Image: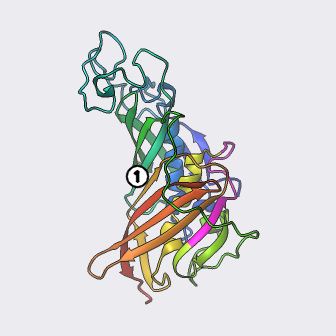
Amino acid sequence: MEAFYRPLGGGLFASTPATAGPWSPHAQHAGPVAGLFGHVLERHGSDSGGESTPHTPRNDPDSGGGATPHTPRNDPNSGGGATPHAPRNGPDSGGGATPHTPRNGPKPVTRIARVTVEILGPVPVAELAVTARVLRPGRRVALLEAEMTHAGRPVARATAWRILAAPERLPSVWHAPAPPPMPAAASPLVAWESAHLDGYLSAMEWRVVEGALGRPGPGVVWARPRIPLVAGEADTPLVRALVLADSASGVGSQLDLSKWLIINTDLTVALHRDPVGEWLCMGAALHASARGSALCEATLADRDGDVGRVLQTLLVDELPSA
């Protein structure tokens, strides 16, 4: 397996068998799906620093299929014309004083700080199309949206906040404990009896600190992809975090996955800084209630410490064979 996806051009990607999740060789794990959204969203509007909806030709794979929206000269995010009116409490207003990033100054450095993926149904291991657009342009905050389709049918959607990178003089404030040391050797891949192991689970390298996929959690693991997300391209820190993040419910599940069907409807990843290095540590735990649903939360860290959080909403049902 050379990668999770092969780029076909025009916003199309061919899914490889490495994307297959543990429930079926024909349905993808949402980790690569989230990573592909990150791959596309990071590139969409990045040159403009989130200043406004970038000009994209109608046949551009990231154009979303429409013309570039009209931005009036007196719009607060236009960056042109007379000094724009901006509400004092708006994130791009600067609070009435001279803003941190002047509108007519150099383009600000921005980063994607939060991604939420809505999983509309099983994502097939097949050819996918991904488009992106800017919902809310701005120099310091911009809201992006992306859609993934198969044969014209939407299978997942995502939103992301691209925000201003904080000043270098900002003191770091972390409340999470330091991650545990990473085990020296790779852990054998152990899961529940019916799990499909030859896709995503084998495409990741796991080093288990606590718990295991084959028994109830909570759990703590160090992990990294063995292959890149997109063939011929290096993974970014955001992509690496997204590819791992959807494993939270498997790492932290306190329910027997051989008896219970647990499928997340969404995935939210919020990063207060970009992770450094290939390896990430995830500590995950699941909460579930009868006549309710399940919620999984996880921490993400690199060797230097905490980087962010993961949250999943999950459907829980009895497996037919239970």
Q: Residue furthest top?
A: 82
Q: Is residue 216 above or below residue 245?
A: below
Chief secondary structure of the magenta portion: loop
Q: Is residue 61 above or below residue 71?
A: below
Taking depth in this image into account, of 47 and 9 the one nearest to the observer is: 47
Number of other residues with Cα within 10 Å of mark 1, as a class: few under 14, some 14 to 19, many 20 or more: many
Return the x and y of residue 322 as percentages of the image width and height: 43, 90
Determine the residue positioned at 48% across, 36% down: 166
Q: Which residue is mark 1?
A: 116
Determine whether, in the image, residue 209 is placed left or right of residue 130. right
Task: Give the residue type at disc 1.
Answer: Thr
Determine the residue positioned at 41% across, 53% down: 117
Q: Is residue 319 above or below residue 159?
A: below
Return the x and y of residue 241 as percentages of the image width and height: 55, 53
Q: Which element type, helix, strand or loop, lies under badge 1? A: strand
Q: Is residue 42 magenta?
A: no
Magenta span of residues: 220-234
**Quadrant placement of the N terminus:** bottom right
Q: Residue furthest bottom?
A: 322
Figure quadrant of residue 160: top left
Determine whether, in the image, residue 65 is placed left or right of residue 283. left
Determine whether, in the image, residue 14 is placed left or right of residue 255. right
Residue 191 visible? The answer is yes
Determine the residue positioned at 28% across, 23% down: 96
Q: Is residue 227 magenta?
A: yes
